[in-house]
Image: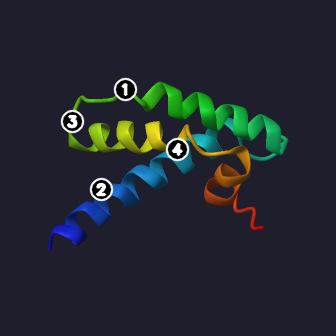
Amino acid sequence: MLSSRWGKVFSYVYEGIRAELNQAAGEGHSKEERLVHLRKTMEAHSGSTENRRDFIKGGYCGCLLEKSDEELGEIFLGEGK
């Protein structure tokens, strides 16, 4: 039950970040431009604490900021190894 509840929250957070990335830096942007926007998005959300979802999003974004560009590309831009 707990994993189901938090799984939904993490899914929401992940999809929210992807949607924000696609809206602001979707088609017609280079990989580098998309990564810059992704990092800016994560920085903007890394201190979020307004509600449970924002708190989780803030923590998740904070952890993601420690990832390399290659790792972020795999996670959010669909670029495999």
- How far is mark 1 from mark 2, CA to CA? 17 Å
Question: Which sits earlier in the primary sequence, circle 1 or circle 2?
Answer: 2
The crowd level at tag 1 (other Cα within 10 Å; few <14, some 14-19, many 20+) is some
| In this rendering, the label closer to the viewer, 4 or 2 | 4
Q: Earlier in the sequence, mark 2 or mark 3?
A: 2
The structure residue drawn at horizontal position 55% and vertical position 32%, both measured from the top left corner, is 41
> Quick one: label 1 or label 4, which is nearer the N terminus?
1
Element on which disc 3 rests = loop
Q: Pointers 4 and 3 in contact (CB under 8 A)?
A: no
Name the residue located 68 percent from the left edge and 59 percent from the top edge: 74
Q: Residue 51 shows which numbered tag? A: 3
Q: Tell me the kind of residue under disc 1.
A: Gly
Q: Residues within 10 Å of mark 4 (few under 14, many from 20)?
A: some
Residues at marks 4 and 2, CA–CA distance in whole angstroms: 16 Å
In contact (CB < 8 Å): disc 2 and disc 3: no
Based on the displayed image, in which of its 4 quarters is residue 49 positioned? Answer: top left
Q: Which residue is disc 2 drawn over?
A: 9
Residue 64 marker: 4
Q: Give the residue drawn at x 23%, y 70%.
A: 3
Q: On the rendered image, what quadrant is the C terminus found in?
A: bottom right
Residue to which mark 1 is pinned: 47
Q: Quadrant of residue 45?
A: top left
User: Where does the image place residue 17, in percent across and percent down from the top left?
Assistant: 51, 45
Between disc 1 and disc 2, the foreground one is 1
